[in-house]
């Protein structure tokens, strides 16, 4: 019975996934209450969706999506911090404004710029795309054994 539970851990990607899950659980159990107490519980969702216009422009200019994620999130966080500090708007309200307006701007830019990559599939993480990414990762791990 225990062999069935331990069998997936023959693969390196499963061990890395377990380490990531444990590290995320440890960090987020500390950061979660901090974010909720500062009225920023909506922040992760807003950051993920507000980066869409930056990624759309970057993909149009020929950059990889993976190269744009972190810089886009940093720009959004700085912009959000400026709005919170320089206006009388609360944190949740500012996050909601940024989230909805940048998300809408992203879709407008996708249609205006004629972006060739289907960013909607990436955004909504279509099951087939996820399975293809998982299959690629599994193949890389099996070839490294």
Image: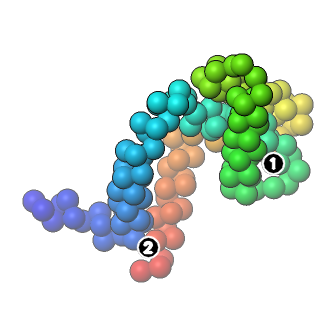
* Mark before the other along the chain sequence, 1 or 2: 1
Q: Is residue 43 above or below residue 11?
A: above
Q: Is residue 76 visible?
A: no
Quarter of the image for residue 75 reads top right
Q: Position of residue 6 (x, y in %)?
A: 22, 64
Residue at horizontal 52 percent and vertical 31 percent from the top = 38
Does the residue at mark 1 contact the one at mark 2 (Cβ under 8 Å)? no
Report the quarter where the N terminus lies.
bottom left
Q: Camera-side residue: 25 or 78?
A: 78
From the image, tell me which residue sits under label 1: 59
Residue 85 located left or right of residue 1: right
Q: Camera-side residue: 10 or 131?
A: 10
Residue at horizontal 76 percent and vertical 34 percent from the top = 82
Report the quarter where the C terminus lies.
bottom left
Residue 18 located left or right of residue 108: left
Residue 53 located left or right of residue 130: right
Query: Disc 2 on helix, strand or loop?
Result: helix
Q: Position of residue 2 (x, y in %)?
A: 12, 62
Q: Residue furthest bottom?
A: 145
Q: Is residue 37 visible?
A: yes
What crowding class fits label 1: few (fewer than 14 Cα within 10 Å), some (14-19), or many (20 or more)?
many
Whole-angstrom CA distance, mark 1 to mark 2, is 31 Å
Q: Is residue 37 above or below residue 133?
A: above
Q: Is residue 26 above or below residue 97?
A: below
Residue at horizontal 72 percent and vertical 31 percent from the top = 85
Quarter of the image for residue 124 reads top right
Query: Disc 1 on helix, strand or loop?
Result: helix
From the image, tell me which residue sits under label 2: 142
């Amino acid at each position: 019975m225990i062999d069935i539970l331990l069998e997936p851990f023959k693969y390196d990607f499963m061990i890395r996934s377990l380490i990531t899950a444990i590290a995320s659980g440890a960090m987020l159990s500390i950061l979660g209450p901090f974010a909720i107490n500062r009225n920023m519980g909506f922040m992760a969702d807003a950051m993920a969706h507000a980066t869409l216009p930056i990624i759309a422009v970057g993909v149009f200019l020929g950059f990889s999506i993976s190269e744009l994620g972190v810089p886009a999130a940093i720009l959004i966080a700085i912009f959000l911090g400026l709005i919170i500090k320089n206006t009388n708007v609360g944190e949740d309200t500012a996050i909601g404004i940024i989230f909805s307006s940048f998300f809408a701007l992203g879709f407008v830019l996708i249609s205006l710029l004629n972006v060739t990559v289907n960013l909607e599939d990436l955004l909504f993480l279509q099951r087939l795309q996820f399975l293809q990414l998982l299959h690629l990762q599994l193949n890389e791990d099996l070839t490294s054994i």
